[in-house]
Image: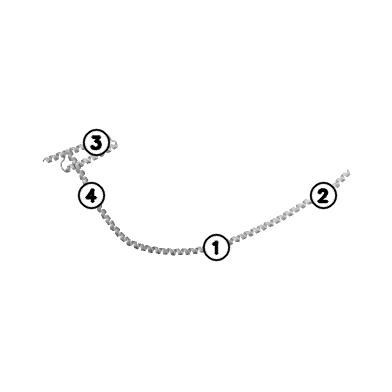
Amino acid sequence: MKRAVITIALLTLPSVPLLCALAQPAHAEETVTSVAAKQAQRTLGKRVDDTTEAVGESVDSAKERAGEAAERAKERSLEAAESLTERARDVAESAKELASELVVGAREQAHQLAEGAAGVGAQSKTAAGDLLQLVRDETRKALIGMAAALDNRAQESRSGTRQASWEKLKARFSLQGDRPTMVLSEELRDHEYRVARLKRAKELAEGAGDKSATSRSERMLEAEYARHKRRLDQMRKEQHAEAKR
């Protein structure tokens, strides 16, 4: 029993230093890792700072370049504007002089043309007036001749129509004379007027469909024809009686 205890004690005594020895490497590794991390952080921070400084310098350099380019562009634009202004002034002066010359030349030509046209216009106006007056005279003469001829023809036509009507009446009612008397002319005129009005009344009645008015117009026309015949017979008898005397 005692031997077993002693053996266990002996086995347990050297285990403590062993455990300590085994624990030390782990602590050392942790220390090395932390130191490496800090070193890497410092290196990274330095690089970031260097990069930031480089970027800032680049930005400043770019701003300076842009400012210089803008100044140069401004100077060039001012120079170009001044050059264009001078050219425009020169062109304007040239155009003004050319326009003045053209205006003067146009006025002279217009004056010359006006003088020439005045002379020609006066002659043309006189000739045109004479020709127009001649045409008017000839036209007036022609119109007067045509009017006279038409009037003569109309008179002849009316005379012929009246003579033909008189011949018919004379043959129908055995009248005498070369032309109707004043009383017979009035009777003929009254008869024509009455017949025309009665025929018009008949046409209106037929258009309106009034049969009674149509019949009445026809009866009045027959009465007018009969009256006219009686009147002509009476005139014929009077003419024959006068002829016997």
Q: Which residue is mark 2?
A: 18
Q: Amino acid at mark 2?
A: Leu
Q: Secondary structure at mark 1?
A: helix
Q: How far is the residue under mark 4 from the one under mark 3?
A: 43 Å
Q: Which residue is mark 4?
A: 149
Name which residue lies at 20% across and 44% down.
160
Name which residue lies at 23% across and 49% down.
149
Q: Which one is nearer the viewer's eye here, 177 or 9?
A: 177
Name which residue lies at 68% across and 57% down.
47
Location of residue 38 (image quadrant): bottom right
Looking at the figure, which quarter contains the N terminus? top right
Q: Amino acid at mark 4?
A: Ala
Q: Secondary structure at mark 4?
A: helix
Q: How far is the residue under mark 1 from the one under mark 3?
A: 116 Å
Viewer-nearest of labels 2 and 1?
A: 1
Q: Which one is nearer the viewer's eye here, 212 or 53?
A: 53
In the rendered view, would you say 85 is above or below 190? below
